[in-house]
Amino acid sequence: MQSTLTQNKPFSIDDAPIADDLKPISNDQRTVGAFAYMSMWLGDGFNIGNITLGSSLVVAGTATMSLFQTLTAAAIAIFIISVIFALNDRFGYLTGSPYVMQLRLSFGTTGAKWASLLRGVPAIVWFGFQSWTGALALNQIVRILSNGSFNNTAICFVIMQIGQILIALKGFKSIKIVTSIISIIVMVALFSVFILLVTQHGAVIQSKLVDVHGSWGLTFFSFIVAFLGNYTAIFESAADYSRELRPNLSNKYRGLLYFLPITIAYGITIVTGAMLAAVTGISSPVNAMSTLFNNNVITLFVSGFIVLGVITTNSVANIMPPTYILTSLFKLPQKWAIAIVGLLAACSFPWLLVQDSSSAGLALFIRSYSIFLGPMTGIILVEYYLERRQYINLSSLYNEQKQQSIKWNAPIALLIGAAAALIQVDLSWLVGFAAGGLATSS
């Protein structure tokens, strides 16, 4: 069933008092093809945050779950991620409008602006985390090439931020080109690390990860939520990406554009992170790889892969969504909004999150924001599919005179869902998603 777009002639969306970046993208302006779209999700999946999440499975050198349990939890999470992506991308794909406009359906014009912060804040924190990790890797590269005369992660962090901001300033077309190229390079690099680990440290991996009697209880399900949470902010704002995708692709075909690259990338990164931590006993992937290989050539290779992976991940997942949110909140030009996002990311203390002791804290951070994003996802899906039956009056959506400022049903459902999720934080996304969706439909 396709959405019906109704245009009310007296009101023109072009004249709506809203930033041009938030207005619908017409079909002839969509330039992202299927290969480039899949490359985006490959590049996003091959990232240091996913490797760090995998390493959090290993505590004090001991895995909390076996390799089979890890793969099972990842498979369940990937299936749910792909389904939610395929369901939630339809609004953006069929209307050409971004996530902040989708939120108007449930929260109203003012409510949507503040609700969008629940998506924007995690993205900014992830932006900082990823960039500082990339800076650690870049620092290693420069230190080796300078024979140890240079060693300043802070300067490398500034370079990373400036470089990524410049890429984002070129718009989605630039991001498409960068991610299409880099994702293939990063995929080859990470598979190389995976093969080196298996061939050179198979016995250690067997004893510390494969032959482990892990838990099928709360620990198992909490890691499903952590794996889900790592993507929940992204599939929450699926409209920001699908609105750029070329038209006339079926729902099933678009579903495959999510499922295939996420399965490949997410699966391999989580397992690689767990193996790295099991072999080295170090939670930070950058430090673990440096210790494990202890070879300048390999270290340069791996560090280069990390830097490239950071650029693709931030370009896809962590820069543009909060940029749209700032544009909506303060009616800023996109260039200013991108610069502010970069500055806020630098102020999120990313150097604390990348410490070895912060690996478990990162998983807790994911579960914490999932307390709110789980209910949010349930609310917007119920609104689009059950309340509106995929019928969108696009002209009315952009006409603030025809929209409520705050639709209280959604904020109340959000609070109910968050309160339910707090009862069991380890299962926050699953509980919040169900409770939020039920509350908004009642």
Image: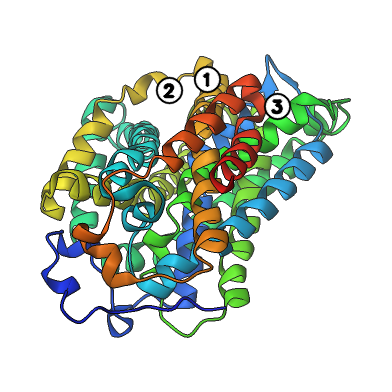
Three-letter residue code for mark 3 = Ala
Neighbour tally class for label 1: few under 14, some 14-19, many 20 plus, Cα within 10 Å: some
Mark toward the start of the polypeptide (3 vs 1)? 3
Reading the image, the residue beneath label 3 is: 278
Neighbour tally class for label 3: few under 14, some 14-19, many 20 plus, Cα within 10 Å: many
| Residue toward you, 420 or 288 | 420
Reading the image, the residue beneath label 2 is: 353
Three-letter residue code for mark 1 = Gly
Measured Cα–Cα span from mark 3 to mark 1: 18 Å
Estimate the x, y position of residue 281 in percent, counting from the top left.
65, 20
| Residue toward you, 228 or 195 | 228
Going 37% across and 72% down the picture, which residue do you hit? Answer: 95
Q: In what element is the residue under mark 3?
A: helix
Reading the image, the residue beneath label 1 is: 361
Mark toward the start of the polypeptide (3 vs 2)? 3
* Disc 2 and disc 1 in contact, CB within 8 angstroms: yes
Estimate the x, y position of residue 398 in percent, counting from the top left.
24, 64
Measured Cα–Cα span from mark 3 to mark 2: 20 Å
